[in-house]
Every structure is written in C-alpha cells, then in structure tokens.
Image (cartoon, helix red, strand yellow):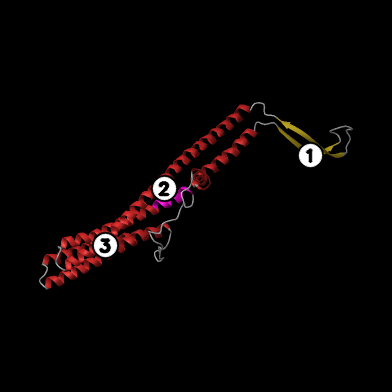
C-alpha cells in the first residue's frame, strides 16, 4: 500500500508537469512560436498518464479489498496505512555466534522442531521405562467369615494387609527396546532437520545482509541520478520556453525524472522486504 501511495505521487507529479507543458505549448502555439504537433504530443502524454493513474488507483483499491479480506474486516471498515517506504528498519549485523543464538532461540521453525523433539524425548523415556523393574507397595482392608480360616467358626472378622512388590518384564524386552529405538530414530531425524534449517537460515540471513548493502549502494547512486535529472529538467524547461529545444527533448527530460523516481521506490521497497526477511529469520515477525 505504501509503495502504491508513493508511486501515485510520482505519477501525479509527472502529470502536473505534463499539464504545465501542455499549457506552455498551447500558449506558444497561439503566439505562433510552436506548431500544433507540440500541443497534440502533450495532450497524448497527458491522456496516457491519466490512464496510468486510473490503473494504479484501481490496483490500490484491489489491494485494500484484499487487505480487508485478509483481516476479516467488513466493507464499511476503513483501513489507513501509515508510515513511509523509505523509513528503513534499523538493524545491526550479528556476529556468527549471535546469529546462531538468535536463530536457535527466536526462529519459529527451529522452536517448532525443538518442541517436537522434546515430546519425542519424553516418549523415549516412557518407552524405556516400560521394560525397567518396578517396585510397588500395596495395602488393603478386608472382611472375611470365620469358616474360611481357622478357627472355622461363625464369626465375621476384619483385617489389614500391606506389602511390597517387584514387577519384572520377562517377555516384553525386545518390544520395548524396539519402541525406544524407533523414538530415538525420530529424535535424531528432527535433530538433523534442525541443523539443516540452521545452516539454511544462516545463509539466507547473510544473503539478505549482502543484498541490503548492494541495494543501499544502488539507492545512493539513484539519489544522485535524481539530482542530475531534476537539474536537467529545469534546464530543458527553460530551453523549451525559449524555443531552444524540441518537444521530444523536453519529454525525455521529464520522463527521465519519472523513471529514476520509480527506480528509487523499487529499491526502497526491496530494502524493506529484505529487512523484513531478516526479522522473520530471527523470529521477530511471523
């Protein structure tokens, strides 16, 4: 949304410049300085930019509708996107040890695998415990008739019994061992996944960092190009008013401004995406 807002601003600025050119061309045509070709050229450019603006506004409406659907909002709800596409996230490059700790602690995929491994670890202990000797204590209260035990009379009696027992599995050892070994294999498999994912995430993190550095260098270059393009356009505007340059040359100068501004927006968008990817890898965002 923020990218579309900034892109709309660039196109609206370009449209305003073209409308100024059209007014200047019409004035020069009435004075007999410029031909009707200049007027028609600028009218065509204005029409083209108007159609592009309408298309961008339609894309913005579609994006807003999609965002409302994603947030489960009603059609009557309004969504306001605040911020700026050139407001970069401040981040410091982590050392290898810090990166390993951050991924190990914060990354959601690694945390999920750890939780699965912990569950299997508990299951492994249970499986192994099934085949261990078990000592248990027992006690009971009972009532019995005198004819059941000496002195074989008609009286009813009551009594208590307590004891200690030992349970040993004689025939289930291999089954329990198999369960434990199967669970251990599952744990080792998850540990392998963890290590592989950690390596992948480290590589993705370092790749994103290098890409951000490259994009920042490109942004500095484009900012200088924008300064040159603006100055060139100022000179071209004066030259056109004084009938020194042609319509095509003025159009080229104006379109170059639009081109480098769009290029800057694209770079800033890519920087934000890479920074968001860094935050995702470290578990700061989902």
Of circles 2 and 3, the one toward us is 3
Q: Which residue is mark 2?
A: 209
Helix, strand or loop at mark 1: strand
Say whether residue 265 is visible.
Answer: yes
Image coordinates of residue 139 in percent, x first then y, are 78, 38
Residue at image point 25% right, 64% down: 14
- Residue 83 vs residue 206, the one in the foreground: 206
Q: Which residue is mark 1?
A: 140
Image coordinates of residue 39 in percent, x first then y, are 14, 67
| Mark 1 surroundings: few (<14), some (14-19) or many (≥20) residues within 10 A | few
**Which stretch is magenta?**
273-282
Q: What is the CA distance from the residue labelled 1 to the residue labelled 3?
A: 98 Å
Of circles 1 and 2, the one toward us is 2
Say whether residue 57 is visible.
Answer: no
Tell which circle, 2 or 3, labels the residue nearer the N-terminal end.
2
- Answer with the quarter of the image where residue 175 lies: top right
Horizontal side, residue 138 vs residue 256: left or right: right
Q: Which residue is mark 3?
A: 230
């Amino acid at each position: 949304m923020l990218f579309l807002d900034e892109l709309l601003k660039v196109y609206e600025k370009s449209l305003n410049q073209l409308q100024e050119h059209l007014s200047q061309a019409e004035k020069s045509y009435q004075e007999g300085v410029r031909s009707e070709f200049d007027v028609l050229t600028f009218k065509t450019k204005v029409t083209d930019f108007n159609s592009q603006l309408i298309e961008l506004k339609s894309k913005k409406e579609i994006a807003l509708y999609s965002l409302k659907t994603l947030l489960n909002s009603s059609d009557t709800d309004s969504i306001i996107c605040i911020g700026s596409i050139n407001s970069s996230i401040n981040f410091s490059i982590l050392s290898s040890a810090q990166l390993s700790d951050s991924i190990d602690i914060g990354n959601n995929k690694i945390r999920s695998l750890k939780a699965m491994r912990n569950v299997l670890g508990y299951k492994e202990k249970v499986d192994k415990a099934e085949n261990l000797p078990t000592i248990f204590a027992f006690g009971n209260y009972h009532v019995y008739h005198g004819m059941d035990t000496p002195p074989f009379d008609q009286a009813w009696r009551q009594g208590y019994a307590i004891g200690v027992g030992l349970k040993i599995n004689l025939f289930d050892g291999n089954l329990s061992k198999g369960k434990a070994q199967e669970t251990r294999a599952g744990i080792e498999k998850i540990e392998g996944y963890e290590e592989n994912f950690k390596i992948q995430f480290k590589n993705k993190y370092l790749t994103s960092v290098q890409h951000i550095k490259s994009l920042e260098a490109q942004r500095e270059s484009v900012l200088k190009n924008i300064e040159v393009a603006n100055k060139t356009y100022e000179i071209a505007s004066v030259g056109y008013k004084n009938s020194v340059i042609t319509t095509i040359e003025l159009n080229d100068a104006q379109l170059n401004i639009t081109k480098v501004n769009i290029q800057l927006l694209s770079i800033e968008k890519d920087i934000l995406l890479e920074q968001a990817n860094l935050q995702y890898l470290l578990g700061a965002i989902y």
